[in-house]
Image: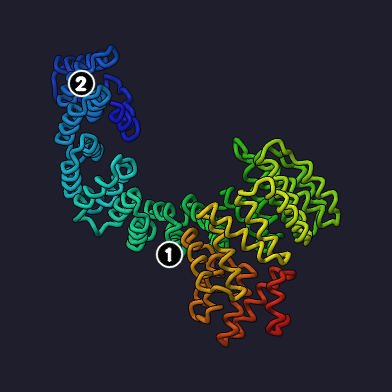
Amino acid sequence: MRAAVLVSALLFPAFVSLPVTAFAQQASDRVSAEETARQVFAVLAGEIAANTGHPGVAYTELLKAAKELDAESLYRRAAEIALRAGAPDKALAAAQAWRKAMPTSREAGAWVVQLQMLMGKMAEAGATIAQDLAQTPEPQRGQAIADLLPLAAQSNDPAATLAMMRTALAGQKQFAQTDVVLGLLRSRTGDRTGGFADALHALNLSPGLAPAAALLLQLYTVNPQAADAAMQKFAGAQPKDSGLRLAWAQAALGQQRDGVALAALEKLVVDAPDLAPAWLILGSLQTEFGQPAQAVVSLQTYLRLARAQPEPPVLTPAYLALSEASRKLGDLDQATRWLDQTQPDANNRLAVVSGRAAILVQQGKMDEALQLADALPQGNAAQRKDRWLARAQILREAGHFEASFRVLQSALKQMPDDVDLLYEASMMADKSGHIKEMMAMLRKAIALDPDSQPAYNALGYTLADRGEQLPEARKLVSRALALSPGNPFVLDSLGWVEFKMGRLAQALDLLQQAYDARPDPEIGAHLGEVLWQLGQRDRARAIWRQAIDRAPHDAMVQAVLRKYGVTF
């Protein structure tokens, strides 16, 4: 009974009572006034019976009236009443009568199929689908197949539904929508790779097919590089689909493919200049990529659009981003004014404090910055952890790596098994020259959390950079890449492992992928070094020039330039 009601509520539109006179008008040209009155009475009797707890009577009267009046809404109502009464067999009979009377009605076919599936009649459901599609004109058949997506999305038994759909759609492989239906079902059975392949094939057949793009983005982490290439074509074919294009940028950000997201958003705001969220994300990325002046323009555009909405969103994220952009421009007073407009709460208090502390550090007011961190609440373990992390971050930004490491060591004495603290402490151990402690912390983090991608990546990279245990380094970084496919920082690490192992061609391919996804200065430093070793010195210089322009004080970039005697 609950399953029947659920299916009715989710998949079928609620019945809206039509004026009785509408049915009378439909019948007026074919029956006598007496006959019309009798039919109207049947409709009234059915509705009265339904509303007074007599579903059997209601079903009989409404189905009879539906047949006599040839009224689709009455067939629907009869089936709905039977389904809610826990009689799916009667609901199916009504739906089949409806489909027989109106063979071109997609809704009637959908009712029949869903009820057959609900009753476990999968072979019959497949036969119904195949028959209806065969009778659908080819120009409309793709949409008819797409109409099956709700069935695929909500089936309680996706494996059985997949088997049924494969048979039912066997003759429809030329339609991209077939791949989407089957891909969705494959992903729901756990075959994410297969689902991704189906979505990708659908977009190859029809680059602008929105359901295929939506499925591809749901499975983005299977192969981000292939997804990005397909979504570029989708954006060209569907420039007005701002929702899916924004979702693409967000999926790329989820895998730290910030360069991909930046490029996608730069094009999106041209095609959809009133899409406020796109401006907010774009502005934040522009600051990260050394474009603070452009970021201010983007973020102020977001504020204008957001404030014009009937219910404006909380603007604190924009004020935080504007403060950071202003700080990067050297306008510390304006950076402070932006922070003064924030509305700190439990979700953003740490970010606001970090922003104020960064300004104070830049002003040389270290003690005041640390006082802000010390003033953070510490009523529970999570708050104490945030307080330690804030203090360590302030010291790190000021270049006091040893002191930052000591703060995190103190935190670990109270929370020795916290993976986040272990990772942060390991990074500061590296910066302050405590390599043994760093590697011990990373190994402990992996033991505590076997899915800690940052720990695998950092440990593998450190081993490779030191030229130690290269096979283990490759295994560790490969595990990190499996946990975060397409992540440019992990691709960079794997490329560096290959470089250290003397596999320059493989290293170049991986590092180029990483740099294309995120033109980070340190990734550029590695890519340039491989290019230099391969004799492509002009390309190496060009990459290094980009890196030093973006991060003129980056220690790694400077070290590489010194190593090869390159100056700009």
Q: What residue is shown at x 51% (from left), y 62% (from top)?
A: 480
Q: Where residue 67 sits: x, y (%)?
A: 15, 26
Q: Total of numbered circles in the picture?
A: 2
**Vertical arrangement, residue 556 with respect to residue 247, above or below:** below
Q: Where residue 251 sits: x, y (%)?
A: 50, 54
Mark 1 Cα-neighbour bin, 10 Å: few <14, some 14–19, many ≥20: some
Q: Secondary structure at mark 1?
A: helix
Q: Which residue is mark 1?
A: 226
**In the image, which is nearer the foreground, mark 1 or mark 2?**
1
* Left or right relative to 333: residue 405: left
Snapshot quadrant of residue 493: bottom right
Pick the front one: 182 or 112 = 182
Residue 271, can we see it? no
Pick the front one: 420 or 264 = 420
Three-letter amino acid code at disc 1? Ala
Q: Where residue 448 sits: x, y (%)?
A: 55, 52
Three-letter amino acid code at disc 2? Tyr
Q: What residue is shown at x 67% (from left), y 76% (from top)?
A: 545
Q: What residue is shown at x 62% (from left), y 74% (from top)?
A: 466
Do the CB atoms of the residues marked 1 and 2 lie less than 8 Å apart? no
Q: Secondary structure at mark 2?
A: helix
Q: Quadrant of the C terminus?
A: bottom right
**Vertical arrangement, residue 500 with respect to residue 364, above or below:** below
Q: Earlier in the sequence, mark 1 or mark 2?
A: 2
Q: Quadrant of the N terminus?
A: top left
Q: Which mark is residue 59?
A: 2
* Left or right relative to 401: residue 241: left
Mark 2 Cα-neighbour bin, 10 Å: few <14, some 14–19, many ≥20: many
**Vertical arrangement, residue 505 with respect to residue 243, above or below:** below
- CA–CA distance in space, label 1 to label 2: 53 Å
Residue 530, can we see it? yes
